[in-house]
Image (spheres, grey):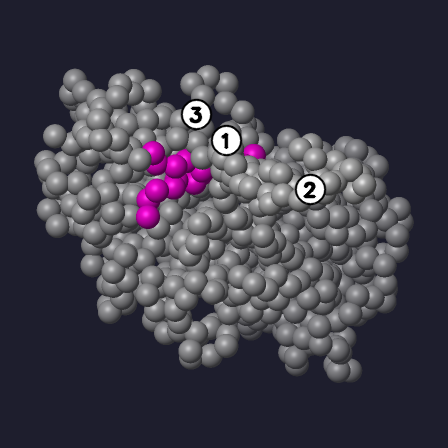
Amino acid sequence: MIPGIGAFTWDTLWCFSQVKGTMETGTTEADIISTVEFNHTGELLATGDKGGRVVIFQREQESKNQVHRRGEYNVYSTFQSHEPEFDYLKSLEIEEKINKIRWLPQQNAAYFLLSTNDKTVKLWKVSERDKRPEGYNLKDEEGRLRDPATITTLRVPVLRPMDLMVEATPRRVFANAHTYHINSISVNSDYETYMSADDLRINLWNFEITNQSFNIVDIKPANMEELTEVITAAEFHPHHCNTFVYSSSKGTIRLCDMRASALCDRHTKFFEEPEDPSNRSFFSEIISSISDVKFSHSGRYIMTRDYLTVKVWDLNMENRPIETYQVHDYLRSKLCSLYENDCIFDKFECVWNGSDSVIMTGSYNNFFRMFDRNTKRDVTLEASRENSKPRAILKPRKVCVGGKRRKDEISVDSLDFSKKILHTAWHPSENIIAVAATNNLYIFQDKVN
Amino acid sequence: MECALDAQSLISISLRKIHSSRTQRGGIKLHKNLLVSYVLRNARQLYLSERYAELYRRQQQQQQQQQPPHHQHQHLAYAAPGMPASAADFGPLQLGGGGDAEAREPVARHQLHQLHQLHQLHLQQQLHQHQHPAPRGCAAAATAASPPASPAPASSAGFYRGAYPAPSDFGVHCSSQTTVLDLDTHVVTTVENGYLHQDCCASAHCPCCGQGAPGPGLASAAGCKRKYYPGQEEEDNDDEDAGDLGAEPPGGVPFAPCKRARFEDFCPDSSPDASNISNLISIFGSGFSGLVSRQPDSSEQPPPLNGQLCAKQALASLGAWTRAIVAF
């Protein structure tokens, strides 16, 4: 088994690596993880939570003594990104919950990331300080000014090592550009601009300019009573800086080219699958709403997640997806109760692995699913404390739909719908995944022989 | 598959969700409310179609049993003599009323009560008529309404709605207006019976706007808050509502007027309570009644009061009914 290229075969076994977070049963809501994101090298893993905090984990260097154990992720930096605010004009409270984190590619020693709540995007700089200047002439060691009359000699200050300190400073605050709730941010491949999307509009920003943004998509109707759909997610193409996609609550995806016009209300491509009339129900509109859209690393495909399925679309074919994977189709007969308990509104995310051969998404009961696009095989795994022995191999789980339940299966009615995995992340090049289960972050790796 | 009974509970569950979303932290979620409004629309369509299919079946049975009486077409506006004409103009969730809140309240309640009585009377009359086209018309309209009607939650953070004083200053036709303040653009538009003012005034039938009414109307006199009385009229304890009228400050929380929306009255625990649904429907006045009484082949003269008994209006008012539910 050769690690590093992210190849997934049916022989891949996933092992527990780490879990972060408290084990206590009384979870404060502020600790619930709301976003997870690896940086471009996979060295850093960032999480945001409902309390507005960002926690960054760094992978430790692999030691030569333990070649079989890949580097672990340890806390690198923690900071409060957003605070609760109050909009006095509208008498609305603005939640501090971090909706999305996106890393910028590293261009110097410091790390930069974007974090956003419902209304404001912030650019954070995370940098290390491990040296301290000592020997100032005009200041003493405590920083107090010295009386110049007492200075008889001059010396050159020197840098002395100190304990590593990681500082996070907000470098830019992009505020007051969104009337509705921000659901997505996406860094452009030009590394100079990024976009933020709310329910009805998408804005384009330059990292250097905080008091202006360009509106590039606006689907707000002149008469709000004619509103039929909202924007649910948006992302830039990984290589073409002029191209982006956005998904809608009606289950459609639009691809736009910013070269065509300043306002990209008219799409370049429109991806929609005709609805199957036999599946029509009261909740058809809800379950067709797309909760996440992601470009493949190659830029050739997009993946969308709606309530029951994950779909892979070829950019060159608009009339239907090329692949559809059922995540938890056994819930189709439970939609009524899922509507009552609001679970039907859960927004699951989906991710590609580094080679675009496997896709992953979450489900209920702390289950998450992986689909191998080549072999068409899928597996259901569980993130639980019971499987938390180091390097313990995760056993595939199975949900029994009806009839006789086999020994290791779990029946649909026993599923715990309060334990949902909405946010997952896959290392850009290795088989390392981060899975957010409420207030715990699980890290799994593939088994290294 | 869900039946009409489940449709009722779905409607009440959905309304409860919309109601509670107003007090949730972070403000009203546009996306979620939009999805809930779709469920509302679907449930309502099923409920209406089943209900009118049932009514039609009963009438067919009676037709076979009795000698058919002469055809009567009843429009809600004419169903009871002495009924104030403006009752027919009640748009969804809109109660006419003039002046300040205090003066308006007894008028509103009175009109509401009359509306309810009218509706009950109307339903009874339907059962005794032999050839009432309503079920067919309704079913057709209900079906037709589904694609174009666009349930839209104006319950977004960007909206504030206030009802406008009625009739004395405006033509009867324009008696029920909703003013919408778009917090994005700070433009105030007047929506009438679910239409933008400019749309309805463009129609040749619009009597009061014949003088070339302005487009998106500017806010006129001091607006009063729109009140919602789900299930309220079923009891005679209207007095409970009195204190709340006018209590909310203008320009306050969006949909603050409906702080005391009476969902406890409208609860699914009261078992297959069709009267609750019909009361709810009766609230929405002409949006529903216009549909009930409309004839597909309009052989009768168009009632002068509500000159827009056209398919478009019925469809839009259906949608407006849904949207208005969501809006508050």
Q: Nearer the viewer, residue B246 or A360?
A: A360
Which circle, 3 or 2, is nearer the viewer? Answer: 2
Which secondary structure, mark 1? strand
Q: CA distance from mark 3 to mark 2?
A: 54 Å
x 32%, y 26%: residue: A18
- Residue B198, by quadrant, is bottom right
Tell me, yes or no, whether dots 3 and 2 are on the same chain.
yes
x 53%, y 56%: residue: A198
Circles 2, 1 touching at the beta carbon (< 8 Å): no
| Amino acid, disc 1 | Asp
| Amino acid, disc 2 | Thr
Give above or below for A314 relative to B283.
below
Which secondary structure, mark 3? loop
**Tag 1 residue:** A163
**Mark 3 packing: few (<14 Cα in 10 Å), some, or many (20+)?**
some
Q: Which residues are magenta?
A: A41-60
Circles 1, 3 touching at the beta carbon (< 8 Å): no
| Amino acid, disc 3 | Gly
- Residue B234, by quadrant, is top right
User: Is residue B150 toward the left or the right of residue B2 in the image?
Assistant: right
